């Protein structure tokens, strides 16, 4: 059995190397289109923009680039030519990386030659991989039996397939880490991030799908000015959905409950652009619902009319996210913030691998997520207007729930927020579980690590000892 596994891994590594060679060869014989060099923000250098794919950014690649250049002739005149160079793009580059092209100077508009930089853009996700800095995050489905008893499963990494050990008594939403299987750190010798696997239980409900956003263009049915669904849905349905969201998103350890919960409109007073509003919303969600996979990247915000509604969330073919707000609501600050609160929850749920195939149910679920993430007051302040309140767009009404359902969701989440800390585990229990996961359920190794830390710092508390042991183990894995 071990021999077969060895040969499978060897063959997989050979395939990866062979694909890398073919990829580099294709890039060299199929150069990019002619790129235009332009002045950078400081005006002292020139830059060209180069888009590469997800795997090229992770593994590195070679590119042949061509750009326009004014060449000085012997007679003092100048002519426009095409300059070509081959550049090595190191592993680990990301969106916004600026690479200097050593020894390459370019002249534009007949000016003196200047140094050239390359501005890299690359998508953050592909397949079941989502990049978070130097770490890779994937969502893996397991059965209830595998979670209870523990298991070893095959998982795909950026290097090929590896064995992942699932410790016994794993909870849905828990994490298991493969150290050193992430993205190479630029400028370091052999340093790499980790590959983090979020484990979720296979759902028995046929109408629901847990996955990362795929690469196809996905447009949700969006916030609409029409009246929401009928009011005959009883509040017990909302309770089930709210409790499910809370179980998935809120922290289970007491140490993560120090921040404020609900955002108020005054908290967005200094957010003078839509991008900054989205950043504040994401920051708050990261604090109050840390078990969701809340993105750090602020998506592109576009003010544009769409036939499908007043707000829209899209993921394009390369994994880039765009949130669109109708210009009819752009000047109504509270309404625009309400639209963004809903669309940001689409972004959070998609990034967390949570999505209902039923469109209406998925939109109601997204509306409820706003209250779980602390956006409830932001939405309630702008989702409707009476004619006397706002002459710009009198009587608008956004959302997929009734007024009574929004009020119930607000009250119920506030009630659960007050009572939930009674169910939380202690910080020490959480740290013990984290150390056990990092040691792959090796109790003897965990005990040895704690004894070592205690021998170094006998006066330290148990919490500090476990924190030091976890930090040391993570550093050793890098």
Image (cartoon, rainbow, N blue to C red):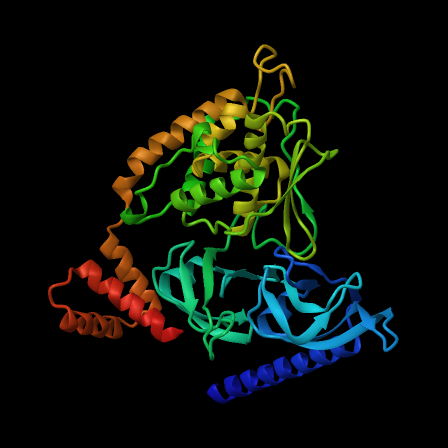
Q: Percent position (x, y) of residue 317? A: 70, 55
Residue placed most toward the observer, 76 or 157? 76
Residue at 44 percent of width and 73 percent of height:
180
Q: Percent position (x, y) of residue 218? A: 67, 47
Outermost residue to the top: 388
Outermost residue to the front: 76
Give above or below for 176 relative to 323.
below
Give above or below for 426 relative to 331.
below
Residue placed most toward the observer, 154 or 314? 314
Residue at 39 percent of width and 29 percent of height:
412
213 relative to 234 in the view: left or right: right
Q: Percent position (x, y) of residue 161? A: 54, 75
Q: Percent position (x, y) of residue 392? A: 65, 18
Q: Is residue 273 visible?
A: yes
Residue at 36 percent of width and 66 percent of height:
167
> Which quadrant of the figure has residue 101?
bottom right
């Amino acid at each position: 059995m071990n021999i077969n596994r060895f040969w499978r891994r060897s063959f997989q590594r050979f395939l990866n190397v062979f694909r890398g060679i073919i990829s580099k060869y294709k890039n060299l014989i199929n150069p990019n289109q002619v790129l235009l060099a332009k002045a950078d923000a400081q005006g002292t250098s020139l830059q060209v923009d180069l888009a590469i794919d997800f795997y090229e950014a992770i593994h590195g690649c070679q590119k042949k680039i061509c750009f326009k250049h004014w060449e000085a002739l012997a007679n003092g005149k100048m002519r426009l030519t095409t300059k070509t160079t081959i550049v090595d793009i190191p592993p680990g580059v990301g969106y916004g990386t600026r690479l200097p092209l050593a020894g390459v100077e370019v002249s534009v508009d007949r000016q003196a030659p200047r140094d050239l930089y390359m501005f890299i853009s690359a998508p953050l996700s592909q397949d079941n991989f989502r990049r978070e800095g130097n770490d890779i995050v994937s969502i893996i489905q397991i059965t209830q039996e595998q979670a209870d008893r523990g298991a070893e499963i095959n998982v795909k990494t950026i290097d090929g397939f590896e064995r992942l050990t699932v410790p016994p008594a794993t909870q849905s939403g828990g994490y298991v880490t493969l150290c050193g299987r992430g993205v190479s750190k630029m400028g370091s010798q052999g340093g790499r991030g980790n590959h983090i696997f979020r484990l979720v239980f296979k759902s028995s409900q046929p109408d629901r799908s847990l996955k990362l956003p795929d690469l196809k263009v996905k447009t949700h049915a969006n916030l609409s000015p029409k009246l929401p669904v009928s009011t005959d849905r009883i509040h017990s349905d909302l309770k089930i959905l709210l409790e499910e969201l809370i179980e998935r998103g809120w922290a289970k350890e007491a140490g993560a409950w120090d921040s404020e919960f609900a955002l108020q409109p005054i908290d967005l007073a200094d957010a003078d652009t839509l991008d900054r509003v989205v950043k504040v919303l994401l920051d708050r969600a990261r604090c109050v619902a840390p078990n969701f996979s809340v993105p750090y990247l602020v998506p592109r915000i576009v003010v544009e009319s769409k036939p499908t509604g007043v707000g829209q969330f899209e993921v394009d073919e390369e994994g880039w996210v765009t949130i669109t707000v109708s210009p009819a609501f752009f000047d109504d600050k509270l309404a625009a913030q309400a639209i963004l609160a809903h669309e940001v929850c689409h972004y959070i749920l998609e990034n967390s691998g949570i999505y209902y195939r039923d469109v209406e149910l998925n939109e109601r679920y997204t509306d409820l997520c706003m209250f779980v993430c602390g956006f409830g007051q932001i939405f309630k302040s702008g989702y409707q207007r009476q004619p006397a309140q706002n002459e710009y767009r009198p009587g608008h009404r956004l959302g997929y729930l009734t007024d009574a359902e929004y009020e119930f969701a607000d009250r119920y989440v506030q009630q659960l927020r007050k009572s939930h800390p009674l169910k939380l585990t202690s910080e020490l229990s959480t740290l013990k579980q984290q150390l056990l996961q990092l040691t792959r359920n090796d109790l003897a190794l965990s005990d040895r690590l704690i004894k070592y830390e205690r021998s170094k710092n006998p006066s330290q508390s148990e919490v500090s000892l476990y924190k030091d042991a976890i930090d040391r183990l993570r550093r050793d894995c890098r």
